[in-house]
Image (spheres, helix red, strand yellow):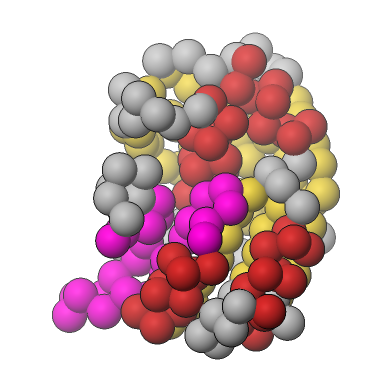
């Protein structure tokens, strides 16, 4: 179990908040996957956002937002989900986003060529390893991060005042 205090200043979306999270790390989950999952949570933050059982349950995403009726507003996957998973997610959710440290062009091409439902609406975000790797190296049981997103760039500061920055590469699958 890891605790995170995230001070979010998302200038691009106009979201400013402090969030306290307790995040369980699945035994099969790598540190970079966990870091990307927490960053995705911060970058998609809204009050109804929650972690799913996506690492251990194929029927749920890593992160999602649902309305009061249970309708899935947002489905967020991490890494390189299969096109079958993306197809299913696109049918169930209003919006589907993939956060990855890998090249998003391959995911986009695969989604289009395999006929993923509403592939043109699929949003892909490539998180730079220049941020994920050093945050993973500093991962502790308690983590205090400040995140600022502005004009597509992400700046993250950790407890010791260490700062990391990189450009978030984004595109749609079409």
| Residue 141 seen from this side | yes
Residue found at x 71% / y 52%? 126
Q: Can you tell which quarter of the image residue 92 is in? A: bottom left
Q: Quadrant of the C terminus?
A: bottom right
User: Residue 101 appears at what percent x and percent y?
Assistant: 69, 44
Q: Is residue 120 magenta?
A: no
Residue found at x 76% / y 41%? 128
Q: Can you tell which quarter of the image residue 91 is in? A: bottom left
Extent of the magenta region: 59-82
Q: Of residues 98 and 139, which is closer to you in this image?
A: 98
Q: How many marks?
A: 0
User: Residue 132 appears at what percent x and percent y?
Assistant: 67, 32
Q: Is residue 64 magenta?
A: yes
Give above or below for 95 relative to 134: below
Relative to residue 163, is residue 37 drawn left or right? left
Q: Can you tell which quarter of the image residue 146 is in? A: top right
Relative to residue 69, is residue 13 drawn left or right? right
Q: Residue furthest front?
A: 114
User: Residue 36 appears at what percent x and percent y?
Assistant: 57, 40
Residue found at x 65% / y 85%? 120
Residue found at x 55% / y 87%? 118
| Residue 25 seen from this side | no
């Amino acid at each position: 179990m890891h605790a995170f205090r995230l001070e979010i200043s998302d200038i691009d979306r106009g979201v400013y908040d402090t969030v306290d999270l307790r995040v369980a790390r699945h035994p099969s989950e790598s540190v970079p996957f966990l870091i990307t999952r927490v960053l995705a949570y911060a970058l998609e933050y809204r009050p109804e956002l929650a972690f799913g059982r996506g690492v251990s349950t194929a029927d749920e995403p890593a992160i999602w937002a649902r309305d009061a009726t249970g309708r899935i507003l947002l489905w967020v996957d991490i890494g390189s989900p299969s096109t079958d998973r993306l197809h299913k997610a696109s049918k169930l959710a209003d919006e589907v986003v993939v956060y990855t440290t890998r090249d998003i062009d391959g995911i986009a091409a695969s989604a289009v060529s395999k006929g993923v439902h509403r592939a043109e609406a699929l949003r892909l975000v490539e998180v730079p390893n220049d941020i994920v790797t050093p945050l993973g190296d500093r991962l502790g049981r308690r983590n205090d991060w400040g995140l600022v997103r502005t004009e597509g760039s992400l700046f993250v500061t950790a407890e010791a005042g260490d700062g990391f920055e990189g450009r978030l590469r984004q595109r749609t699958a079409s």
